[in-house]
Amino acid sequence: MPEKQLITCLKVTTLTAMLLFSCQASAYAKKGLQLRYNAETGQETSYRTIMEGTTKAFFGAQTSKTEMRTEMYVTQEVTGMTADAIDMKTRIDSGEYTVNGTKSRIPLEGREILSRMRPNGSIIEADQIPGLDVSKMQFVLPEGDIQIGTAWQEQILPSEDVPAEMTVSYRVAGFEEFAGRRCVRIDSEVVTIQKNVLSGLSINLRAKGLILFSPEEGKVIRNDTRSKMSVIVKHIVEGQEQRYITSTELKSRTLCMD
């Protein structure tokens, strides 16, 4: 599998997993539950993410298979607060990815990313990191109270690294017990809107996940995601169309380590 194609798969699947877990918020009940980011300056929250997947590539009669595994640890620290904004420092503490048994350290290990967001989680500004868009990682909370059945959506616009527009849908499914905590369960789904994103390139992504959020502690406790993605690259060689096709299946789990 070409290195550029592998990197694209890792970026898309990493984005899919991360944009569904990056949340620490407060909740209180009136008619329902209202969720808002509300942390104290100096507060830190740590997460562990494990992603495992397989990519199959097809080019004419040739086929190949790539096994991938990524494990990383991330810490978010609140560095300042006002009534309208929260300053956050996200640190990629450590991590490694394994491709067909060969291990490597993740490129951004040790990197700190500064961002400022509104109380609902939407990003006001953030450090620009090639291959990592913080604004696409943040879980934006809905306005008003939520109850079972409450649903909302986000649009993810195309970028240079992931040239596909996506829709992220959330729905409050109910309550679950996990690790001794009573959590709100939020089901999620990510789909590509426009399949043919560039001339000769099409991407089809679909991911489903669940978020377990503890209202008492005001943070995400667990997030699971399963995704399937196909990428088709078309070339014309000597008047004949040739296709390079990759199919990736990925599962991930993120756990709060506090």
Image (cartoon, helix red, strand yellow):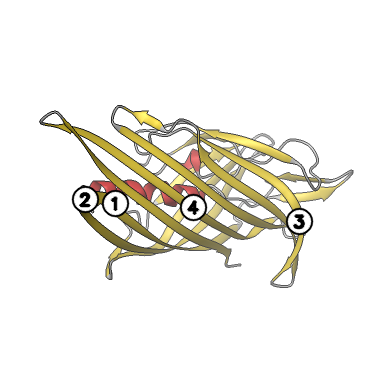
Q: Nearer the viewer, mark 3 or mark 4?
A: 4
- Viewer-proximal residue among 92 and 150: 150
Task: Give me the residue at 37% from left, 42% from top.
Answer: 129
Residue with the mark numbered 3: 215
Where residue 208 appears, as percent x and y from the top left, is 57, 51
Residue with the mark numbered 4: 227
The quadrant of the image that shows the C terminus is bottom right
Residue with the mark numbered 1: 6
Where residue 230 appears, as percent x and y from the top left, is 38, 45
Where residue 172 appears, as percent x and y from the top left, is 73, 48
Asked whether the beta carbons under mark 1 and mark 2 sit within 8 Å of each other, the answer is: yes
The Cα–Cα distance between marks 2 and 4, rounded to whole angstroms, is: 21 Å
Residue 2 circle label: 2
Choose the circle earlier in sequence order: 1 or 3.
1
- Viewer-proximal residue among 233 and 82: 233
Quadrant for residue 70, please give it: bottom left
Q: Is residue 13 above or below residue 121?
A: below
Choose the circle earlier in sequence order: 3 or 2.
2
Q: Secondary structure at mark 1?
A: helix
Can the viewer see residue 118?
no
Q: Nearer the viewer, mark 4 or mark 1?
A: 4
